[in-house]
Amino acid sequence: MIAQSCMDISLASPLLGGLSPQTFMRRHWQKKPLLVRQAVPNAIDLVSRSQLVALAAHDEVESRLVVQRAGRWSLRQGPMARTAMPPFKQPQWTLLVQGLDLHLPAARTLLDRFRFVPDARLDDVMVSFATDGGGVGPHVDSYDVFLLQTQGRRRWRIGKVKAPELVPDVPLKILANFEPEQEFLLEPGDMLYLPPGWAHDGVAEGECMTCSIGFRAAGRDELGREVVQRMLDAADLDDRGPLYRDPTLAATHEPGRIPVALQGFAAQAVARLLADPNALDCALGEVLSEPKRGVWFDAEVQDIDASIGVRLDQRTRVLYDDGHVFINGESFRASGRDARMMRRLADRRALTATDVAALSEGARALLDDWLAAGWLQGAD
Ligand code: SIN
Ligand code: CO
């Protein structure tokens, strides 16, 4: 069965402490923290300690190990075997595993509960396991994050920091001038939302596991560079274009000076490259829907069984704008009923058999390609 219900963003939700997604976004998002007791009462089932340790050994999974010993911090990047980690009875260490939503269906389902925020802003589900006293030290993240306690207890201390100063010579970004203003002890199921720029320090009280539902925020210059690069890659630039002409050029006694008209010609050339709004929208959608680093799809040829519908692989990213649909870094023009169905596929991450039957032959052929690439699966 395909879940057809999209969440009602005006309904009060226990996930947000009785606020509706609309109210949460208005009052808290990017503005102020929110503590929610029992936001996800069954959070304990998300992932076990042994599953997390096993994931950290995989090449395609991003993980880090942070150990504190005798007042010193050490950091090791994964992949790593269990034998590379300290014993569980040793205090003050933590294992952090990124991208659980790519690997565990339960983590993907959890992430789906936060889809009142656009997918273009969602990053991933990270889970940390810590022994008593473990944590990553006081720090500031530049991203919004929901910190959900899944097992054991963790004490969070948070505070606003105006001019962060870092502890020198440690392999982690640890704040030297952290002044906590509030403190919360989180039990399994409790959740703390923090906007970017709020300093926080989470210390395990006994063994604990914490899940971070993280968001991404594009850096202006980084996004600009990526989008322009895509536009250049897509533009047909084999032709040199019309040549620069200067029939009115006068004799110069400053031969080293670049002619102003040539500067104008270059400015026009660049503006022309970037002026096509369609090319810009396409490039942006492709950049934003690019799969996460390390994601490989298993290509297998299957026929769509229209009687059961399709759903997206949990690692597939689908976004859309008014004229296009973007899937895993590729863009397609879409209009009419096909566009409506492709948007439904993006919003619900699935299409029913009836939806599939409504697609044009061309759109069905695209679904076939995406199935063959391993981006979709037949729904069961
Ligand atoms: C942790 O889970 O230990 C760290 C999460 C965070 O501070 O962002
Ligand atoms: Co943090």
Image (tube, rainbow, N blue to C red):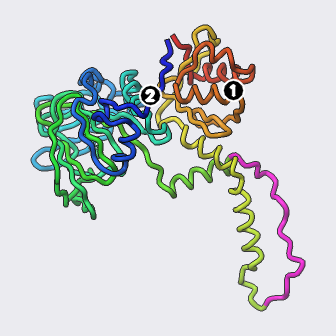
Q: Please report the residue visible at 48 percent of the width from the left and 26 percent of the height from the top.
A: 6
Q: CA distance from mark 1 to mark 2?
A: 23 Å
x, y percent for residue 215: 40, 42
Q: Residue at x 57, y 50 (%)?
A: 226
Q: Quadrant of ligand 2?
A: top left
In terms of depth relative to the viewer, which is nearer, 282 or 257? Answer: 282
Viewer-proximal residue, 296 or 260?
260
Please tell me whether mark 1 or mark 2 is closer to you in this view. 2
Residue 169, visible in the rendered structure: yes
**Mark 1: which secondary structure?**
helix
| Residue 303 occupies quadrant | top right
User: Is residue 216 toward the left or the right of residue 303 in the image?
Assistant: left
Q: Is residue 212 left or right of residue 59?
A: left
Please name the residue that numbered disc 2 is placed on.
7
User: Magenta segment range?
Assistant: 234-252
- Going by the numbered disc 1, the residue's amino acid type is Asp
| Residue 251 forms part of the magenta stretch | yes
Residue positioned most to the right = 247
Residue identifier under label 1: 338
